[in-house]
Image: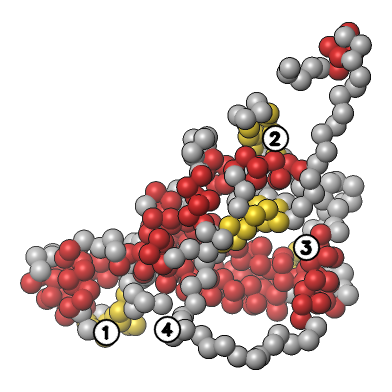
Amino acid sequence: MGAKSPKERAALSLPEEMERPRRRCHVVVDATIEALIGAMRDNPQGVILYSDELESLFANFNRYNSSDESYFLSAFSGTPFKYIRKSTDEHIFLPNPYCSIIGSTQPGRLAKQFGGERVVNGFSSRFLKVYPDITDMPTWGSDRMPDGIMEQWERIIRKVVTFDFKGKEQPIELTFSLEAHRKLCEWKESVNNAIYSATESEAEKAVCGKLETYLIRFCLIIRIMKNICAGESASMIDVGSAEAAIGLVEYFREMENRVIRVSLSGNLDKRQSELLDALPYDFRTSDAIDLGRSLGMSESTVKRFLKNSAIFRKEEHGRYTKMSCDP
C-alpha cells in the first residue's frame, strides 16, 4: 500500500501517519549510495563515509543510478540536489549536502580510480590524497601518543558537533584580517596561478582550482580549532591561520603530484616512456630535444612533454630535473 496524504487518511478514518524515525550518526561505514543519501538526509550536519577499500565504493557509482557520481560532484560545493531512492520510490531533497569520504586504495589502482574521465570532470581533484614516502616496512616500537592528545581532539570534535546547523542560531561569519588576506592573495598570484599557467597537465590544472577552495576551508577549520583550544571567540581569520592553511595546501599538492606521477607512469605512450628512461636526472632542454629526435619526436612535442610538471621540475631556464615516479 502506497503512502496516503493527510486528507486521504482522514477520509478513510485512518490514524495520522507516524513520522519515520531518523537515525543520528556521524560516521557511515561502507554504505551503498542509497543508504548514504538517507544518512545525509537524517543528519543535516553532515556525515563521514569511511570506506576501507575505495574501489568498492566507486564500483557502486552509477550501478543503479546513472547520476550517482554527479551527485558527489555537486556535494563538494554544497549544491542542493534531489535524489530518488528507487527501492522505496522516495524523493529526498538535500538543501545543504555534506559528506566527507575517507578511505584507502593500492597504488596500482590509482590510474583506474582517479584517472581518465575523473580527471576531466574534476572528480579526482576533489579528493585530498596522502601518499607517504615509505621505502621500507616500518618497525614495531613502543612509542606512544603523548598524553592528552586524544582527549584534546575529542574535546574539539564534541564542541564542533554541538553547533546548531538547523537555522535556530545566526550563522557566524569569519572575515580575513588584512595581513591574512594579503598572504592568501600573494600565494594565489605567485604560486598557484604560476603553476597553472606553466603546466599543460589537465590533472594539475584541476588540482590548482580545487586547492583554492580547500585553502579557504583550511583557514576556517584552523581558526575554529584555535578558538576551541584557546577558549576564544575570534571572528577574524588571522595571518597565522592563513600561513598554516597554505602549508597544508602545498603538502597536499605534493601528495597529488606523487599520485599523478604513479598514474602517468603507466599511461605514457611508447616514445614518451623511452625518452623518460633515456634522460638523466638533471638535463638541459637541448639534451631532451636531441634524444627526442632520435626517437622520432619533434622539438615541439618534446617541449610540450617537458611542461608536464608532474614528471619534470623546471630548475631554471633550459634546465630540468626528473621527478621520480616512485614517491
Circle 4 sits on which residue? Answer: 135
Residue shown at the point (88%, 75%) measured from the top left: 231
**Taking the image as drawn, is residue 57 in sight?**
yes
Q: Residue furthest bottom?
A: 142
Identify the mark nearer the N-term, 2 or 4.
Answer: 2
Identify the mark nearer the N-term, 3 or 2.
Answer: 2
Task: Classify 10 Å Cα crowding around label 3: few (below 14), some (14-19), many (20 and above).
Answer: some
Question: Distance from label 3 to label 2 (Cα)?
Answer: 28 Å
Question: Distance from label 3 to label 4 (Cα)?
Answer: 42 Å
- Taking 271 as reference, is 147 left or right? right
Task: Identify the disc placed on residue 93.
Answer: 2
Question: Distance from label 1 to label 3 (Cα)?
Answer: 46 Å
SS at mark 4?
Answer: loop
Residue 63: x %, y % from top left? 49, 38
Tell me the kind of residue under disc 1. Tyr
Tell me the kind of residue under disc 3. Leu
